[in-house]
Amino acid sequence: MNNSELIITGNNLRENRFFILKFLIVWPTLILTSCIILPFIEIFHSFFNLLTIIPILPFLVIVYFGSFILSLVFFAKLYLILFNLIHKPKEGFFKISVYNKDYYFYYLRKVLKEFVIKIFDYFPLPWSKVLPLKLFNIKLPSSAGVLDSYIDSDFIEFGEEAILGEGSIVMSSIVVGDRLLVKKTIIEDRVTIGAYSVVAPGTIAEEGSILGMGSYTKINQRLEKNWIYVGRPAKKLKEIIDDFNQD
């Protein structure tokens, strides 16, 4: 069975050896956030007494958390620039080993990005997930709907008005045996990925195609324009006919 025939078997790699990276980004973030918020609190304390400050504490908490996650993105972006300067991201089929630079730096970037995105998920605004993805070089137009889905951290491209259903997964990497496959995934304009569906690495979903609920694609599969695909793995079900254009 060749790579194009493989189905999704797993994507999670062990993070233990990279856990220190989270501390290296959190501590400078906390320091910067404190430098921003403490003068703000001191000004309020100088002009108002404690009783007048208490009612605005929820506002101060929101300001502090907002400052924290924006500072987190700032330092994460600095780390990513450094990693990319040391070793440029690329697609390929890499041996899972810390001695393999392609694997090692790919997973450094992955751990860093996913950590930041998880923090952003706690922020109660709709752009909180889209902002870090855009800053982390995922091509994601504002018209795309991706808020209730999981998106891999590299080599993903979305077109205009693409929609991901609740619980759907779009991957550009997967573990195959003792190797890591990294392959660009493209979701073109007006593509719909059904709820709880899985898009495998290397998939190209052409304009207007639909992947049905609970389905998954094969590695390097192409979903043809204006076709509905369902199944595990996905197969053609029905062509979408544009009645307006036919008339």
Image: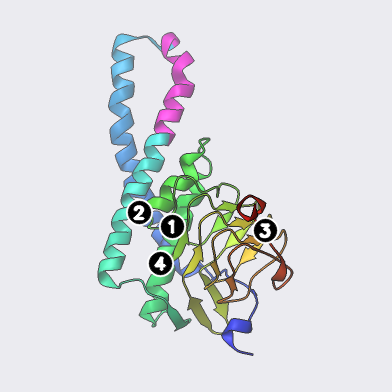
At mark 4, the secondary structure is helix
| Mark closest to the chain's N terminus, 4 or 1 | 4
Circle 3: residue type: Ile
The image shows residue 237 at horizontal and vertical percentages of: 74, 67
Do the residues under discs 2 and 1 have CB atoms within 8 angstroms? yes
| Mark closest to the chain's N terminus, 2 or 1 | 2
> In the figure, is residue 64 to the left or right of 11?
left
Whole-Å distance between the Cαs marked 4 and 3?
45 Å
Numbered label tally = 4
Over which residues does the magenta segment extend? 51-65
At mark 3, the secondary structure is loop
| Mark closest to the chain's N terminus, 4 or 3 | 4
Query: Residue 76, which numbered label?
Result: 2
Circle 1: residue type: Lys
Dominant SS in magenta: helix
Q: Where the N terminus falls, by quadrant? A: bottom right
The image shows residue 34 at horizontal and vertical percentages of: 33, 35
Query: Residue 108, which numbered label?
Result: 4
Q: Is residue 62 magenta?
A: yes
